[in-house]
């Protein structure tokens, strides 16, 4: 299982067109330590595994067992949009009519903002 962890890490490094040195720098793990873990096929500490996954824009779950499903994309969305998490929680409590009303209001706000921009540039 550990060997597969590092195979996935190496695959993602290659997929991102980067190098192990970059990963070490991005995670704050010493390059020699990272190389040693990879060559000896030893699991990183849990907090280092999280740093590695985050740097490679994936999850520890994927690195450990290869699971990459829709939950990964949902988690990635939440991580990238953490500042909106409270707003998203409120949205989940709305019914379909309320969501439609909210969508109408948002469209109106966007259109109003676009009008302001056009007025300023004219």
Image (cartoon, grey):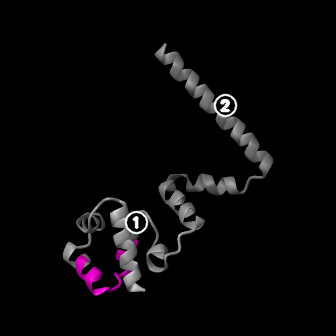
Mark 2: which secondary structure? helix
The 10 Å Cα crowd at callout 1, few under 14, some 14 to 19, many 20 or more, is some
Q: Say which quarter of the image contains residue 57.
A: bottom left
Give whichever of 61, 81 is nearer the camera. Answer: 61
Q: From the viewer's perspective, is the residue at label 1 or at label 2 nearer?
A: 1
| Residue 108's disc number | 2
Mark 1: which secondary structure? helix
Give whichever of 30, 18 is nearer the camera. Answer: 18
Give whichever of 33, 6 is nearer the camera. Answer: 6
Q: Which residue is mark 1?
A: 54
Vertical placement of residue 52 versus 45, above or below? above
The quadrant the N terminus occupies is bottom left
The 10 Å Cα crowd at callout 2, few under 14, some 14 to 19, many 20 or more, is few
Kindly check if marks 1 and 2 are in contact, taking CB atoms under 8 A apart as contact.
no
Give the residue drawn at x 40%, y 69%: 53
Taking 46 as reference, is 34 left or right? left
Residue 85 x, y percent position in the rendering: 56, 56
The stretch of residues the image draws in magenta is 35-50
Give the residue drawn at x 56%, y 26%: 114
Give whichever of 4, 62 is nearer the camera. Answer: 4
């Amino acid at each position: 299982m550990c060997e597969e962890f590092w195979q996935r890490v190496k695959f993602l490094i290659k997929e991102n067109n980067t190098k192990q040195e970059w990963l070490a720098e991005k995670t704050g793990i010493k390059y020699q330590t990272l190389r040693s873990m990879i060559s000896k096929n030893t699991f990183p500490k849990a907090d280092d595994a999280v740093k590695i996954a985050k740097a490679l824009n994936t999850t520890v779950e994927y690195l450990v067992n290869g699971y990459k499903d829709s939950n990964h994309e949902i988690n990635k969305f939440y991580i990238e949009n953490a500042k909106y998490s409270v707003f998203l929680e409120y949205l989940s409590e709305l019914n379909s009519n309320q969501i439609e009303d909210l969508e109408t209001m948002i469209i109106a706000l966007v259109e109003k903002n676009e009008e302001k921009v056009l007025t300023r540039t004219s």
